[in-house]
Image: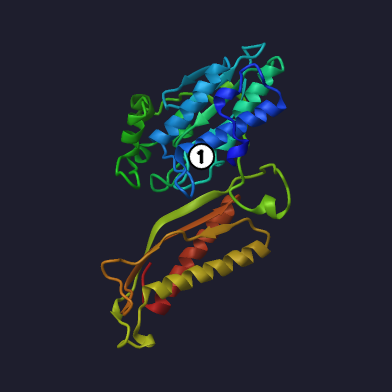
Amino acid sequence: MADDVALPLSTIPPESFMTRELESLAQALFYQFREMSFDGTGISWETYGAGETQAMQVIERLAKQHGFETHWDPAQILIVRLQGSEPGMTAVATGSHLDSVPQGGNYDGAAGVIGGLIALLAAKDRGGPRRPMEMLVLRGEESAWFGGPCYFGSRAMFGQLTGADLASQHRDNGLSLAEQMRACGVDLTRIEAQDVIRNPDELHSWLEIHIEPGPVLIARDKPVGLVTGIRGNVRHRRVVCRGQAAHSGAVPRWLRHDAVLAMAELLMRMDEHWRVLLEWGEDLVVTSGIVETNPNEHAVSRVPGEVSFALEYRSQDAKTLGSFGNLVRSECEQISVKRGVTF
């Protein structure tokens, strides 16, 4: 957000909410969030971390300034409520999360939070809704900080957080999720008991805007799209291929059991399966985001005897996920025989 379009929050009076003022407020919030955490590349707000909490407090203070009801639930999710003319009706809810991946984008999650707050302000300015409206600032939605599990805040709200989730370790500080949550004021007794903090039946509907984490809308010159499906995923966080270490100058190709080449062949075969499945009309994406040889053993002159890698595949169709998983196992078996390795 350029400095010349960002207005300090203090210059925007609560009683002045027309279209231009709402746009200026959104710009000011995005700018303030960026200034709070920009590190030269992106922003880094940890799941159940101090930066995430501080950003939520900015939203809370602004909401209170403009007369909204606010409270934090036992999972430390912030709820901003605009009462309707018929308060007994279930609420229309909106919102998003404020944690980010390391060096993430300033609009990821924040667009839904700021957009949700703007929607409540606009509704209030127009005399208020008939049905109550709520904006939820969720937390702990990202998977990057605790090794893969995600949606901690929303799952805690619905009593679905498990002991394994709570034992997950932070990628940097080594704290468990439970310790990280406790430091943020979470009522762990209720979370560990899997109490349902919020019954979904209390909400009439959920509407959320979110920045697209990909280039499709830009490539098609579309300003907005409607989400028709979200891909579920299968994640193998650490696949290990074991071959046999050897001297790179002394061992000929026919006697090698190169773990890296075996992994590379597997990934290339899966990439070809992916291409064919797309031609058949299947929905699928495939990623290997982590590849590692042992830094204590690897060398330019050493045939690698072991390599570990991550493998994730996503689809909107559970059957496609199952079929692709079977292909992965089948290819691992074939390459194991061919190259004398194991997966």
Q: Residue furthest right?
A: 221
Residue 89 image point, x, y percent = 64, 15
* Three-letter code, disc 1: Arg
Residue 170 drawn above or below residue 123: below
Q: Quadrant of the N terminus?
A: top right
Seen from the viewer's position, the closer of residues 237 and 137 is 137
| SS assignment at label 1 | helix
Which residue does the image show at 55% across and 67% down from the upper left? 271
Q: Residues within 10 Å of mark 1 (few under 14, many from 20)?
A: some
Q: Evaluate whether residue 159 shows in this view.
A: no
Locate residue 163: give its quadrant: top left
Q: Residue furthest left?
A: 296
**Which residue carries the number 1 mark?**
34
Locate residue 203: give its quadrant: top right
Residue 258 image point, x, y percent = 37, 77
Which residue does the image show at 52% across and 71% down from the upper left? 268
Q: Residue furthest front?
A: 4
Q: Quadrant of the C terminus?
A: bottom left
Tell me: 167 left or right of 114. Answer: left
Tell me: 284 left or right of 162. Answer: right
